[in-house]
Image: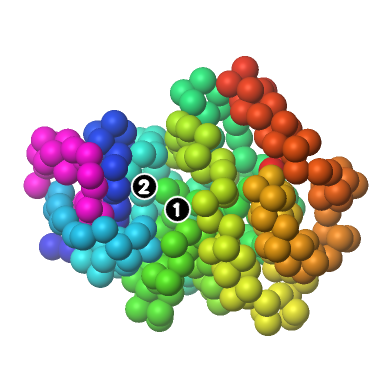
Amino acid sequence: MIPFFSIAISVYNKASFVEQTLRSILNQSFSDFEIIIVDDGSTDNSLEVINTIKDNRISVYSIKNQGVAAARNYVLQKAKSNYIALCDGDDIWLENHLSELKQLIESFPKCGVYATSYEKHFFNRYVTQPKFSHVDSPFFGIVSDYFKTSLADNILWTSAVVIPRKTIVSGFVFDETLRCGEDIDLWIRIANTFKVAFSSKVTAHKMIFAEDNHLSLTKNIANLTTVLDKHKSEEKENPSLKAYLDINRFAIAMEAKILKDYGNYNKVKNAIDFKHLNFKLRMLLLLPSNVLRLLKKIKFFLLKKRLYNSPF
């Protein structure tokens, strides 16, 4: 019998975290699911840790490392269910995660993607709530404008979404030419084509353990500019998408300047319509790189002191 959900997990060097992730999934109040795990060529003992967890709903595959987009697509192809829930190997689900998503699906069956809200957990010390714009709280329904709603934080986050099989077979999979930003690119494409259903109930934890985990774009600037360039023609017809991409351009420009990568800094900055940035962000764009580096160090210091107030 085909389960209601397929849970797709890609793992790369998550030996310290993956057991906790899997335990949180197995502890779901709604249990009609299969778990498909792909180890993307881990060089630590992730695969050994995974294999210690015994449950007849779990299938494990091991492939040569090809990057997260290819690994996620591999798992999507193995899924049997009509609804595929994604989870990374270091994030945590609360026990109501799948049951809340099931209610969304049953309430709004024609949507192209479903999502719940989440908390950000920094360094196991500090918890913040994401900030969504132009959406009520609480909210349970179809988002009227995904890009306007996601100007501060994205409503769609990989470990808190379900993608229907019909969306995937329509060609909406991760772009394997991208080495990062593949999730942002997919959410843009889906939100441009389908309705997005969302519940503001927190059902997952985004676990952020280190400065280079979710917080830094340092190694990925060229790739992220490619993601934005893919949607240049669409943003001309969609003002909300243009504003959303400009906020992302700001973040990339800041990282490029910190690295003294002035070529990418100028390229990205010149594509921004400054009406989409508030005064504070516009001023930050003008600061010298050494000042931005100092501000970034202060940001991590504040995070570790349980204070979070940063625009980049």
**Residue placed under numbered mark 2 in the picture:** 88
Are the two marked residues, 1 and 2, in contact with CB atoms closer than 8 angstroms?
yes
Residue at x 22%, y 39% (from the top left corner):
44
Q: Indicate the position of residue 118 as horizontal and vertical percent values.
A: 51, 40
Image: 186 above or below 307: below
Secondary element at tag 2? strand
Q: Is residue 48 magenta?
A: yes
Give the residue furthest to the top.
Answer: 305
Classify 113 as above or below 207. Answer: below
Name the residue rendered at 66%, 29% in the picture. Answer: 297
Residue corresponding to mark 1: 158
Q: Is residue 272 above or below residue 304?
A: below
**Residue 97 among magenta residues:** no
Quick check: can you spot residue 149?
no
Tell which circle, 1 or 2, labels the residue nearer the N-terminal end: 2
Alpha carbon of mark 1 to alpha carbon of mark 2: how far?
7 Å
In magenta, the rendered stretch is 31-56
